[in-house]
Amino acid sequence: MSVLSKTLVAVGIALAVGGGFFYWWPSNITPEANVNSATAVGSATSDDSSTAKPVSPFDPVISSDNTNTEVAQQSSVSVAENSNTKNASQLVPSASEEALALQAYDLGATDLSDEQILDFTLRLKTDAAFLQAAGDEFRAETDPDRLKRLAFLLGEAQDPSLTPIASDMVYSGNRESQLAGLDLLRRLQPFDSSARDVVMNILTTDADPEVMVGTLNVLTLPSEASDAEKQSIVDHVLPLTTNNSAAVRQRSISMISKWSSDETAMDVLAAGLNDAEESVRSTAAYATLNLDNPSPAIIEALFAVLENQNELPRARKGARQSLQGKALSENNMLRLQTADAQMRKQYARKP
């Protein structure tokens, strides 16, 4: 046999063997091998058919596994549900572990950071038992510093159930407890009208000036009230505008200006601008800032304070600031400019 013939025979044998191999490979691979090979090679599976077309003859045929697909879908749903649950829980704030572990007898023992105040306030608002325990601590406390901290924190809770506790403290007979109870009432009054009822009772008594000032401070923040309620407050406060204590007169004038805008307030403010005490005059001057249509008597009383070169600076500055916001006649505008120039010269710093 020639060399050419031998070569042709060898090529034919090789082609026969190779064809048989290609025929045997895809038909004899097992499903387990398919899965493992798919993992190793990274061949893509089809979502729409049970068999994915091989990329090349050397790639195995990848069959769809319904069981694995179902497990994968359930896993996706589980992850989504967990994610939704987490997001929903994040919408509702919760107190920190520190706040939850705190006992009521430790609350207010030390100064707190802003973040701690928010945490403890949240617990006071959401844990009724803790709020009650903290209220009991407040009622029994005698340390002035802790009383102030507790009054602030309990006030942040804005819970009307604390009003009876504050009221009990006001009538306790202990000065520190009285002032702390009034401080808590001041913080609760905008949210609980019954806090004002306690004030009305105290204002009719002959309390000492410090307690009376604390009582008036309860009304510092006006809240929603009927005209009749506002008039009742004014009627109770009005007699105090002539009290022997300058501090009481000062606070009562300020309260009248907050709760009334009629002629009663005008008369009280005009009298305050002519008071013998500078602290009362300055309070009255600043209290006129919000008057849109002051009476001529108020305007003249403000000028009397402003143009008095012997008046103390704070009262004069309050009168000037108030007049600058009013609609004045041409003559009064000239008076204001003249007095302003004189004040600047008088109070100018000397080199």
Image: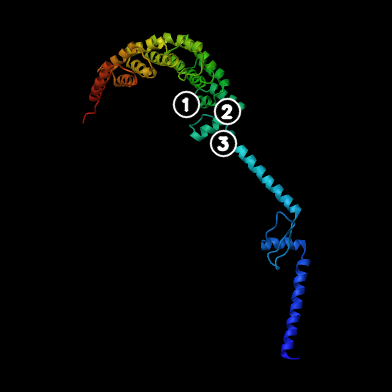
Percent x, y of residue 157:
54, 26
Q: Are marks 2 and 1 in contact (CB under 8 Å)?
A: no
Q: Amino acid at mark 3?
A: Glu
Q: Which residue is mark 1?
A: 145
The front one of 135 and 232 is 232
Question: In front: 329, or 76?
Answer: 329
121 lies above or below 246 = below
Residue 192 rendering spot, x and y as whole percentages: 54, 19
The x, y position of residue 284, in whole percent, is 36, 16
- Say what secondary structure mark 2 lies in: helix
Nearest the viewer among 165 and 310 is 310
**In the image, which is nearer the foreground, mark 2 or mark 3?**
2
Residue occupying image coordinates x 66% and y 44%: 80
Q: Secondary structure at mark 1?
A: helix
Label 2, label 3: how far apart the Cα atoms are: 16 Å
Q: Residues within 10 Å of mark 3 (few under 14, many from 20)?
A: few
- Sequence-wise, the earlier of marks 2 and 1 is 2
- Horizontally, is 135 left or right of 8 in the view? left
Percent x, y of residue 188: 52, 21
Residue type marked 2: Lys
> Which residue bears the numbered disc 2?
125
